[in-house]
Amino acid sequence: MVFAGGLVLGGYVWFGDAGRHESVARHRIDRLLLPDGIETLTTITFRRGDSKVLIERMAGGWVYVGGQPCCATSNADSSSFIDARVRMLSTARIERDFSLAAIQPKHYGIDAKSVRIELAFLQPEERSWILAIGGRTPDGFGQYLHFEGTERIITLPAYHIDNLLRLYAHR
């Protein structure tokens, strides 16, 4: 009898709240921000107010075109610093993907003072995205990004955004 009660309790603990996790999972997105990788990424531009930092992929690697990093001792150091951060971005997985709908962007910490990141790609077709960086999610682990010109908001793990912003602050 005790054994049977243990099985029932164990079954509930193991499977009992599966329905609650299922409903959360339907709203979770688990795909890469850059599904084609970083090979087609050609430039990264950071903008905030009048401040602009431009990073381009050249034959020898990534270089700061608008604003040389203050801490680097040579272009090789800058290139490896940039490359490490861009490669990490290639692993960034979108956690949530939803529409602004009737909610204002400022609800997500996105306003005129937000840093904008423009990612320009060469292939499959020439295109670019402008992402406005918003605030942290309520749990503090994610960060909101708004695809400018659309109603699309996504969340990424905040450490990916922190990592990318190091390119902006490193200049």
Image: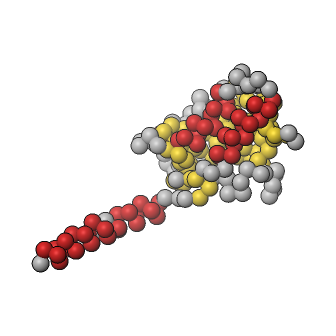
Residue 40 appears in the rendering: yes
Choose between 113 and 41: the one closer to the eye. Answer: 41
* Above or below 74: residue 91: below
Choose between 126 and 95: the one closer to the eye. Answer: 95
- In terms of image quadrants, where is residue 20? bottom left
The answer to whether 6 appears left or right of 120 in the picture is: left
Choose between 28 and 76: the one closer to the eye. Answer: 76
* Above or below 64: residue 27: below
Query: Residue at image x 48%, y 39%?
Result: 136
Of the 4 image quadrants, the one containing the N terminus is bottom left
Residue 104 appears in the rendering: no
Across and down, in percent, residue 97 comes to 54, 54
Across and down, in percent, residue 23 comes to 40, 64
Across and down, in percent, residue 108 comes to 50, 40
Query: Residue at image x 59%, y 29%?
Result: 113
- In terms of image quadrants, where is residue 146? top right
Across and down, in percent, residue 66 comes to 79, 28
The answer to whether 109 appears left or right of 120 in the picture is: left
Query: Residue at image x 80%, y 32%?
Result: 76
Choose between 113 and 25: the one closer to the eye. Answer: 25
In the picture as drawn, the residue positioned furthest to the top comes out as 70
The answer to whether 15 appears left or right of 62 in the picture is: left
Of the 4 image quadrants, the one containing the C terminus is top right
Query: Residue at image x 67%, y 57%?
Result: 35
In the picture as drawn, the residue positioned furthest to the front comes out as 3
Q: Number of marks in the image?
A: 0
Indicate how the structure is coloured in the image.
Answer: secondary structure
